Image: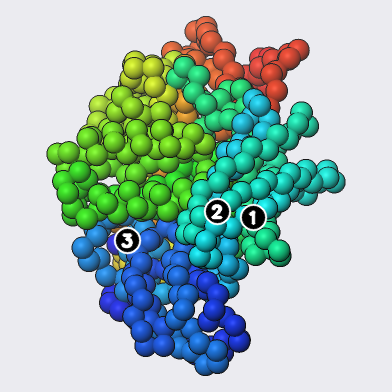
Amino acid sequence: FWLQPEKKYTGAAWYRKTIDIPEGWNEKPVFLNLERVHWESTIWINNQYLEMQNSLATPHYFDISGMLKSGINSIAIRVDNRTKDVDPGHNSHSISDHTQSNWNGITGDISLQKMGEIFFTDLAVFPDVKQKNISIRATVFNTIFGNEKITVPVSVQLKNSTQKAQKESFEFSLLPGENIVRMNFPLGEEVQFWDEFNPNVYELIAEIKTKKITDRQNVDFGFRDFEIDGTRFTINGRPVFLRGTLECTIFPKTGYPPTDVESWKKVYAAVKNHGLNHVRFHSWCPPKAAFVAADELGVYLQVECSSWANQTTQLGSGFPIDQYIWDESKRIVKAYGNHPSFLMLAYGNEPGGPLYREFLTEFVTYWKENDNRRVYTGAAGWPELPVNDFHNIPQPRIQGWGEELNSIINAEPPKTNFDWSDKVPNDGIPVVSHEIGQWRVYPNFKEIEKYDGVLKAKNFELFRESLNAHQMGHLADSFLLASGKLQALCYKADIEAALRTPGLAGFQLLDLHDFPGQGTALVGVLDPFWEEKGYISPEEYRRFCNTTVPLARLEKRIFTEGETMTAKIEVAHFGEKPLQEINPIWKLIQNKKIIAE
């Protein structure tokens, strides 16, 4: 039971285009850019085979230099959405029918790019918050036979501000082919930092000049230090608690993720309106627009390398997925590594196989040694590796796997005097709890009409038919409201327990919005369109999930007449500034009437 496409096709599909190429292009480097492809693309230029690419996370970028002619040319692209030698895992949200659908095609930017004789192939920016400068590692390709001297003017400016651009110029001598050059650019004391409260984004523009400008590239970056302090994270020296949710490629209108910034701003607005500051992309990596929107709105992202290597495949056993993970991670960091919102990287979700620990230890070690702009963990779910910057494990939660009626929420009377201190490893590594919540709610049958795109809610239609067949159709709204109110209370209990836990670094909910796959998991207070269901508002949600949350530790929740209620009051505060001169107040309310304060 999950969302169903009106049509389903697995196999190769051909896309052809005839284009008119201007004079002179055949003498220049030319690249074909396909922003998001599902899945494998193979290219023919004028009936001449070029190559195949199969990234699920980054653009497919083909060097077609020398293959074009002036005048009419043909480009043929074969896109194949079958799982072949590379198996990321049949449940991976990068390919699974559970969520986005196994679509076939190309979305986003499709373009031919003509370059100069010398051009950038990569610009990586490494900000140093303490020194207030940036190190730039540029990869430059020289097509000229012989050494060539170039000048690289660089300008840096805070976006959407009146600050003047700061400029520096650098000179290099290039060999033929690929060259890596490094530049150091001090920016001074007026640097503006990036975080969830002040998402200041800088634009860097770099040019290559010989006798004329042969290339010009721009990248966005931000000044932020995301570091580890004991068992917690800091950003720019201030403690931060990750309040996160998952995104599992759930886009029912189209069946594929959007490549425009505004669509992602809607997602992140819903996230922040509910007091969250963090999104984990479960076993997939979003397009560039998702990073741009997160940069602008101040959302912290965990990205994964397109895989849930379990059941149908495994890590570390020499299968093709091993090399694919290495290649995919390098493509992801090259494509999106400058974005300040890109804080965390994992291979993917819940790995399987006898040798995955060895594989992931090497994976984390490599990235820690080669790129210090983010923190790394082997995988979401498990294992707890000594080399991990943080653990992403499921234990700190109210309802653990396999606990059934033995969990604290089922086996004990209601109370709030517990936390997860006994479930957090004592190895000194920060813990972000994995997929907490998963509290289900009854279907909202009024939602069916929203599915007017590629995917249809056939599962909801079956559920509604069953309810009507049992003469209870008139109770559908009541079932939704009752189960929804209970769901909200369960999420409140889960989140507050996490906030009470000393030293816990954060949590990732499954989920703020519904997960339509795996037998229909209606685990969100929002529907798959990130819209409210009517039983809890964002304002109500933020009362227990926010930068600042008052907490009360109670030995029990039910008191009888004559008893004395004793509570230990705490405050979870991870705001922009410390709380000062605060006068706490309390009220005891019964039937909307204040009986004590």
Any mark on residue 174, and which?
Answer: 2
Tag 3: Cα neighbours inside 10 Å, few (<14), some, or many (≥20)? some
Mark 3, mark 2: which one is toward the viewer? 2
Q: Is residue 42 left or right of residue 109?
A: left
Asked whether the residues under the numbered discs 2 and 1 touch, taking CB atoms below 8 Å apart as contact, a structural biologist would say: yes
Residue extending furthest toward the bottom: 72
Q: Position of residue 381 (x, y in %)?
A: 31, 37
> Of the residues shown, which amino acid type is indicated by label 3?
Ser
Cβ atoms at labels 3 and 1 below 8 Å apart: no
- Give the secondary structure at mark 1: strand
> Residue at the spot x=42%, y=41% of the render?
345
Q: Against 585, is 393 above or below? A: below
Q: Between disc 2 and disc 1, whose residue precedes? A: 1
Amino acid at the residue labelled 1: Ile
Q: Is residue 449 left or right of residue 221?
A: left
Locate residue 402: give its quadrant: top left
Closer to the camera: disc 3 or disc 1?
A: 1
> Which labelled disc corresponds to residue 562?
none
Distance from disc 2 to disc 1, alpha carbons, whole Å, reads 7 Å
- Compare marks 3 and 1 and give the one earlier in the sequence: 3
Q: Which residue is mark 1?
A: 150
Identify the residue at image location x=41%, y=74%.
105
Which residue is at the front of the view, 556 or 200?
Answer: 200
In the picture of the structure, the residue carrying the numbered disc 3 is 96
Quarter-wise, where is residue 202 in the image?
top right
* On screen, residue 16 above or below 359: below
Q: Is residue 539 left or right of residue 416?
A: right
Q: CA distance from mark 3 to mark 2?
A: 46 Å
Which x, y percent locates residue 170? 68, 46
Residue under the image location 46 percent in, 42 percent down: 302
- The amino acid type of the residue labelled 2 equals Leu
